[in-house]
Amino acid sequence: MSGPESKDPKQPSRKLRPILRRERNVLIGFTAVTLILWWIHPRLGLIGIGLYGMHLLYMVLYYTRLP
């Protein structure tokens, strides 16, 4: 099939690809920071989880407001 019907719905759109690539890198970074903080003290690991949660909230709010 040719045309828009043949697009795989599981594939992200071209607009989303750079965002998802950057988000993957951010997730790797936050995971590393969280593990290091958790290694120092388990409660400090919660800071890393909270920071990533705030980052996700910011990303959702920022990209849903774009036209």
Image (cartoon, rainbow, N blue to C red):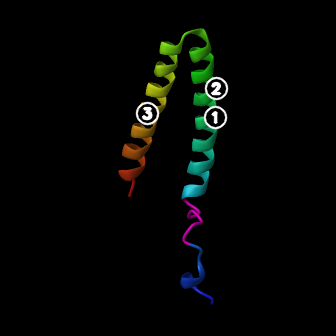
Q: Which amino acid lies under the numbered mark 2 shown in the image of this protein? A: Ala
- In this picture, residue 12 sits left or right of residue 56: right
Q: What is the quadrant of residue 15 in the picture? A: bottom right
Q: Position of residue 5 (x, y in %)?
A: 54, 84
User: Residue, x 59% and y 82% (percent of image)?
Assistant: 6
Cα distance, mark 3 to mark 1? Answer: 14 Å
**Tag 3 secondary structure:** helix
Q: Position of residue 25 (x, y in %)?
A: 64, 38
**Tag 2 secondary structure:** helix
User: Residue, x 61% and y 51% (percent of image)?
Assistant: 18
Q: Residues within 10 Å of mark 3 (few under 14, many from 20)?
A: few
In the displayed structure, would residue 52 be above or below residue 9?
A: above
Q: Which amino acid lies under the numbered mark 3 shown in the image of this protein? A: Gly
User: Residue, x 47% and y 19% (percent of image)?
Assistant: 47
Q: Quadrant of the N terminus?
A: bottom right
Span of residues in magenta: 9-15
In the displayed structure, would residue 24 be above or below residue 42?
A: below
**Tag 1 secondary structure:** helix
Q: What is the quadrant of residue 41 in the picture? A: top right
Cα distance, mark 1 to mark 2? Answer: 6 Å
Residue underneath mark 3: 53
Q: Position of residue 13 (x, y in %)?
A: 56, 64
User: Residue, x 41% and y 32% (percent of image)?
Assistant: 54
- Residues at badges 3 and 1 in contact (C-beta under 8 Å)? no
- Residues at badges 1 and 2 in contact (C-beta under 8 Å)? yes
Which residue extends farthest bottom? 1
Residue underneath mark 1: 28
Number of the label disc, if any, that sits on residue 32:
2
